[in-house]
Image (cartoon, helix red, strand yellow):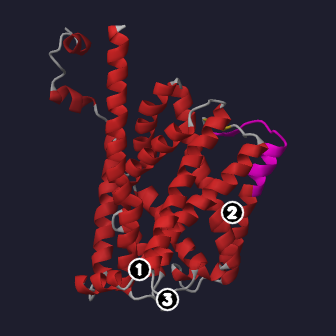
Amino acid sequence: MDDGENVGQGKGVPQAGLISRMTAKDFVWPVIGLSAVAFSIWLLIRELRGISLHNVIDSLNAIPSHNWLLAGGSTLLAYTALAGYDRIALLHLRRKVGWVFITLCSFTTYALAHNIGMSVMSGAVVRYRAYTSQGLSAAEVGILVAFCSFTFGLGTILTGGVVLVVEPALAERFFANLPIGVGRAIGVGMLAFIALYVVGSWLNLKPLKIGRFELHYPKLSIVAQQLIVGPLEVMGAAGIIFWVLPEAGNPGFLIVLGIFLASFSVALLSHAPGGLGVLEFVFLTGLPEVDHASVLAALVVFRLFYLLIPLVLSLFVVLAFERAQFFERARRGSS
């Protein structure tokens, strides 16, 4: 009797059989994620020498009340823009879903994905469960997930390009003795990529093929919305940190924004849950002129506003959604 028959009869598949069918690639991302966390924590421990918890608490207490409010406003801006990612993707798919549903789905998706790590995969699971209940097919949900990720990428590239053109010395904070012209050239290259994307949409070019991946250019009106919402999201997230940093040694919003883009991009590539250790190390390295205890205090606020509070609230959204789905199935069964 084969494994399929065993499952059908409820006997289950032996654990050894499951393990034997797992290939090396099934372990790659978990190993990368754990390694990134371990390495980041090791680097962070080196950076934290001489910083006491008491100093971090004092820095938190020193944050003015209005700065806490500004950080909260930046959080609302970031999550509003994240909801815009889903809305733009649905416009591209020409599917209509209520704005309230989009907002709650997006909020829950990113609150969970940012904390769990591997945001594309974890976000896809949440979106599939939510949007299939609204009539979208699995293929459409896949396109939606990819489109949202691409919109984030566009926002990061556009914002990063502007920052490097205006503040080319930013790159020297991570690469010593790097000529200023190199940083500005990288920024110009990033903006050139954005320009090519806009031109491709304007001219309605054929899909761009990269291996098996095809990029279908959306309408110019949708591209315009992507180039607004993407930068707003990263600026809102970076604003949480900027507003709670002390004035002493603060290099300004553009520098903080550039460091945030670098740290968040590395955190996403590492698949470390919540960018654990990665954000702290990159910020401590990129802001040597700011008191390290104050930098850590700012990142505590960021994690509280951008990660932990949304995570708790998202759990209530999930419970409410599943409750509504349960009663809907019960109603259909009784009719």
Residue at which label 2 appears: 190
Residue nearest the observer in this picture, 253 or 282? 253
Along the polypeptide, which appears first: circle 3 or circle 1? 3
CA distance separating discs 2 and 1: 25 Å
Residue at which label 3 appears: 247
Q: Is residue 32 visible?
A: no
Q: Amino acid at mark 1?
A: Leu
Residue 152 against residue 213 in the figure, above or below: below
Q: Report crowding for label 1: few under 14, some 14 to 19, many 20 or more residues within 10 A (C-alpha).
A: many
Extent of the magenta region: 195-210
Foreground mark, 3 or 2, reads 3
Confirm whether the magenta stretch covers residue 205. yes
Is residue 19 shown left or right of residue 284? Answer: left
Q: Report crowding for label 3: few under 14, some 14 to 19, many 20 or more residues within 10 A (C-alpha).
A: few
Residue nearest the observer in this picture, 125 or 310? 310
Is residue 43 shown left or right of residue 193? Answer: left
Quadrant of res 194: bottom right
Q: Residue at x 37, y 48 (%)?
A: 112
Mark 2 secondary-structure assignment: helix
Say which quadrant the C terminus sits in.
Answer: top left
